[in-house]
Image: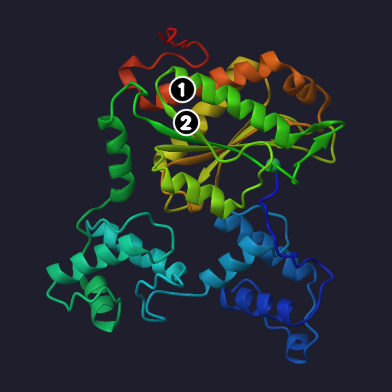
Amino acid sequence: MGTDSRMQPLRPGDRGPAVADVHAALRTLGLLLADGDDALGQAVYDAATELAVRHFQQVRGLSVDGRVGEETYRALSEARWKLGDRLLHHDPERPTRGDDVTSLQERLHELGYDAGPVDGVFGPETEVGLRAFQRDYGLTADGTCGPATLRALRQLGRKVTGGRPQLLRQSAHFVESGPHLIGRRIVVDPGHGGPDPGFTAGETTEADLVLDLAYRIEGRLAAAGATVYLTRGRYQAPTPTERTAFANDAHADLFLSLHLDAHGSEHARGVASYYYGTGSGASSTVGEQFAGLVRREMVARTGMLDLGSHAKTWDLLRATRMPAVRLDCGYLSHPVDRLLLLDARLRSTVASAVLAAVQRLFLPAEADPPTGTFVLPRAR
Ligand SMILES: [Zn+2]
């Protein structure tokens, strides 16, 4: 797995000002009691800290490891902001991030305004949505969420109930765009690469295997009429930000990231998929749907263990502007999974599974064949 974190994570046993920062954030969230040692400059990452961090990670849909790496650190600082704590506006240089931005975006969507993705980042689309709201309600349309705008947002009843209009719009767009893959742009993202091999098993690396899978998937999808882009070749190792920016610049309709797993326990095995979501509230319905489709097709065709689909707030899933899914195609550390993955026929089967899942995503429901059976007629 691995979320490509670059900062040295804080972990049990660590001490110092950075730990005191984490304690302060956890206390603000009500997850940790006051600690006298912090005031004396003796903050220690103890068992209580680890427990609180694990709880926070669980609730936020982050990888639960009890440590504070880059993603958890940022999520902690973002979670401190409640709507009304500060003025919110679009700053192209340093976009404002935080739970207050998420609340604003959700509120605008509830009121029927398109404010772009509910991602906790105040971007240009948030500004457009906010200005439209301000104009309609006779406020100064300055794109800044200050006291008057806040009051209006709070006083208004909900125009739309029982739904997440932005997500419904995303689904509607998919239905409208028809059953075939011609004109579809799909970005396939083989994890790791270049100097970063990912997990290794003897001479075989995760980076090489997922690249091979990506080439096979590219071939299948291209034969079905889709336009496919890979985020890297053999010798590059783009950062997560570069990968998501690439998909955004390509105006992709779908983003699929490929990884393998490994675990200290030789019993760990199977296939899992991940989509953007917090486990409660905002999630990508299309992402969730595709995460289920691709995992079930793969499990049905390979007989590998089904480890389910899971909502995550990883940057890779959050910063992509199209439905994004990460597929973990098995454990290199498991003897059977490894044998399967080393077999080129199995990797072709995985490519077929991805093609079937993509087709099912774009096909109307009534034309949807049972899992594991759909085979595309050969492209001419
Ligand atoms: Zn990986």
Residue at 47% x, 23% y: name it. Answer: 221
238 or 28: nearer the viewer: 238
- Pointers 2 and 1 in contact (C-beta within 8 Å): yes
What's the residue at 39%, 66% (across, down)? 122
Rendered location of residue 317, percent (x, y):
52, 48
Q: Which residue is mark 2?
A: 228
Q: Residue 266 placed where, x, y %?
A: 85, 33
Other-residue count near label 1 (Cα within 10 Å), few / some / many at <14 / 14–19 / ≥20: many
Residue visible at 36% across and 76% down? 88
Question: From mark 2 to mark 1, how far is it between C-alphas?
Answer: 6 Å
Out of 186 and 141, give the one closest to the viewer: 186
Q: Position of residue 75 (x, y in %)?
A: 57, 65
In this view, 169 is above or below 294: below
Q: Quadrant of ligand 1?
A: top right
Q: Secondary structure at mark 1?
A: helix
The amino acid sitting under disc 1 is: Ala
**Mark 2 or mark 1: whose residue is earlier in sequence:** 1
Q: Determine which residue is flagged by label 1.
A: 222
Residue nearer the viewer, 117 or 210: 210
Q: Say whether residue 241 is visible.
A: yes
Quadrant in which residue 328 is drawn = top right
| Quarter that holds the C terminus | top left
Q: What secondary structure is marked by label 2?
A: strand
Task: Say if 172 sits above or below 149 in the image.
Answer: above
